[in-house]
Amino acid sequence: MRVILVFFALVCVSTSHSKPSDSVDVKDVVVDKNGVAYILDKEAKLVHRYDSILGTYLAPMSLKINATTIAYSKNHERIYLDDGNGRVYFVETNNFSQEVLFVETKSPLLAMVVVNEYLYLVPHVGTWVTAYLYSKDGKIVSAQDWTYGGEGYQTDGKATYFTSIGVSPPDIYKQEITSGKLQHQKDTPFHGGPTFLKLVGPDYNYQMARPVAANSSVLVLSDGHLLNVATMDIQKKLNHGITSALFLESSKLVAVTNEKNLVLRFFDNFVETKNFSLPGNNAAIIGEGSKALLVYEYKDSIGVERLEDIFSGKVTL
């Protein structure tokens, strides 16, 4: 299955450099501040680059490691690669040559999340874990013991949010970060708080929920709940299950929903304004602002469209 990239830019397809293999997943794509997409091809051990402004593939980079996860740091101007065994490497985006060892942890990672000028790492060492914040030079600037591990990590730049694992019942947690220091974890009312149970009822399946997007005021969950990031209380519920989402502005949200099929939905102040059916079985929205992009898989083809054209109706998928 090939990967289709949808960009906020006028593009055309170039065949001057190799394209991703059929095995690439939508989770393996990041985009930098210049609109260049980095596509981790695990099978071919390559990082492909696609310039969304020029509409062309650039020269890829061969990897010496078997990378499993990719992340992008705008502050560091790097992509980070996890090898699945606790070692993290970086590649400078302005000197795209070879991966360099960044840090080595004691065990494989549960999470690798960029939070402003830091890299947030959570090694997998059991139910209770130690979370770390690393600076650009690979030094630990903060560590927090006896924290929950989780999945579905999202960040608003001041905290990370995730669904806990190894806890019954699971919950949505907030790991606060202030002045480069990891603070306490705060949970939502998922664990039995009266506010949450009153809103959703006793039969709510909270195990299905995970964070999919966050900004300075709202956390979006995969079941459509919107949480206030300050209080972690529920403030609204969208009528869709969400697989991926992104805040374009403070009150403008774009999301991929998956009921019977994939639908791209645009929201203004959390009221839906437009929606478009998507082909394929998987999609993700990544990046920020005008450099944001939509990635989706569809059969064995590869295609490129402007998201602005989809929104305006100029392009029909």
Image: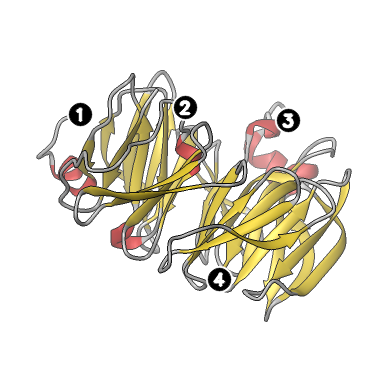
Q: Earlier in the sequence, mark 4 or mark 1?
A: 4
Question: Residue 33 is drawn in which quadrant?
Answer: bottom left
239 vs 92, nearest the viewer: 92
Left of 182 or right of it: where is 241?
left
Locate the N terminus by quadrant.
top left
Badge 1 marks a residue whose secondary structure is loop
Question: Disc 1 versus disc 2: distance between alpha carbons?
Answer: 22 Å
Q: Which residue is mark 2?
A: 23
Mark in front: 4 vs 2: 2
Badge 4 marks a residue whose secondary structure is loop
Mark in front: 1 vs 3: 1
Q: Amino acid at mark 2?
A: Ser
Q: Residue furthest left?
A: 314
Q: Residue at x 44, y 23 (%)?
A: 259
Q: Which residue is mark 1?
A: 317
Q: Earlier in the sequence, mark 2 or mark 3?
A: 2
Residue 116 is marked as 4
Q: Which residue is mark 3?
A: 202
**Disc 2 and disc 3 in contact, CB within 8 angstroms:** no
Mark in front: 2 vs 3: 2
Question: Disc 4 versus disc 1: distance between alpha carbons?
Answer: 35 Å
Q: Amino acid at mark 3?
A: Pro
